[in-house]
Image (tube, helix red, strand yellow):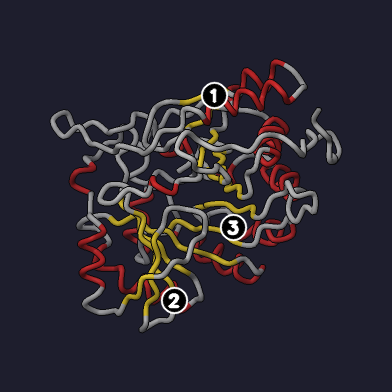
Amino acid sequence: MNSIVGTIGNAAPLVADAAPMVDPFGRAVTYLRVSVTDRCDFRCTYCMAENMTFLPKKDLLTLEELDRLCSAFIAKGVRKIRLTGGEPLVRKNIMHLVRQLGRHLGSNTGSGLEELTLTTNGSQLARHAEELYDCGVRRINVSLDTLDPDKFRKVTRWGDFGKVMEGIDAAQKAGLKIKLNAVALKDFNETEMPDMLRFAHGRGMDLTVIETMPMGEIEEDRTDQYLPLSELRADLERQFTFTDIDYQTGGPARYVTVAETGGRLGFITPLTHNFCESCNRVRLTCTGTLYMCLGQNDAADLRAALRATEDDGLLHAAIDEAITRKPKGHDFIIDRTHKRPAVARHMSVTGG
């Protein structure tokens, strides 16, 4: 019989002896990425079309439902939750969810959350940074592909570089540690990477560079944007001295230390070198769909189980069934003949 270890307000209780999640390949699932909205106040050229059709707001889970789902995953062994989007900070009343999830941090029950974090474009950070820290968030990722304000506007279409810099300033002042994420784009920002490295490390921030992923229909051809990180690393090593390290943040990045700056640089390489052998992640969308792999289309509908009953037993069973279908790895292959993406859904739907 399940033993209840406590609840706050109307939130769902944690079940102390809920079965942990282990996939068919023996990998424990301890990391949940949650897309709280598919909407964004940017329209990055490699991520989405300029005139996107977003989900009707009525189709989204409520913040209370997202909290209950996340709490179920925590009870089943998730130790890290990352809130994503779209842009998570544009979701109305999002800080209510952040505060609710923060109650699981530092739990002494043995079934608590070790880290609550988020990935953001930085546009809303200036007004939310202090409250994020107050809710227990200690580390965030900020997506930033260029330090050139004009190029920034070009790649984001709608973004304001100045606001992002204000957000980074506010986040650091609030005590949040920041890692910058930069998507490597051929003929756009590869020559900027040395300056981005110096900028990030000069501000005490890590930098991670990411290969563009073929997800969702956009107006541009990603085959023209794709830059293998093996090439980028070789270029950078003409100026910097790298030492491979075992540093991990729970994600797929492989890190090096940079002798000249003293900072860390990460590489995420879904195309040239997949990172599936140690995958501990699943992704939950704002509609309650669980994707067991970013690069596959198989998914599980958790919304039906969530809304069928207040008893979390059915929800836990639906999660368990989904984990049995977690694949060994992704297969990002671009249909170059028809210039179609490998996965039809946009990154903003899955949450990165």
* Mark earlier in primary sequence (3, 1): 1
Specify few, some or many for label 2: CA neighbours under 10 Å numbering under 14, 14-19, or 20 or more: some
Count of labels in the image: 3
**Between marks 2 and 1 in the image, the one whose residue lies nearer the viewer:** 2
Q: Secondary structure at mark 2?
A: loop
Query: Looking at the rendered structure, which numbered label has been put on residue 263?
Result: 2
Dot 3 surroundings within 10 Å: few (below 14), some, or many (20 or more)?
Answer: many
Q: Which residue is mark 1?
A: 56
Query: Is residue 207 visible in this depiction of the protein?
Result: yes
**Three-letter residue code for mark 1:** Pro
- C-alpha gap between disc 2 and disc 1: 43 Å
Tell me residue 143's x, y (percent).
45, 56
121 w.r.t. 300: above or below? below
How much space separates mark 3 and mark 2, taking CA atoms? Answer: 23 Å
**Residue at the spot of label 3:** 125
Tell me the amino acid under the disc marked 2.
Answer: Gly
Residue type at tag 3: Leu
Front tag of 3 and 2: 2
State the image coordinates of residue 241 (x, y, percent, origin top left).
30, 79
Residue at (37%, 82%) from the top-left corner? 259
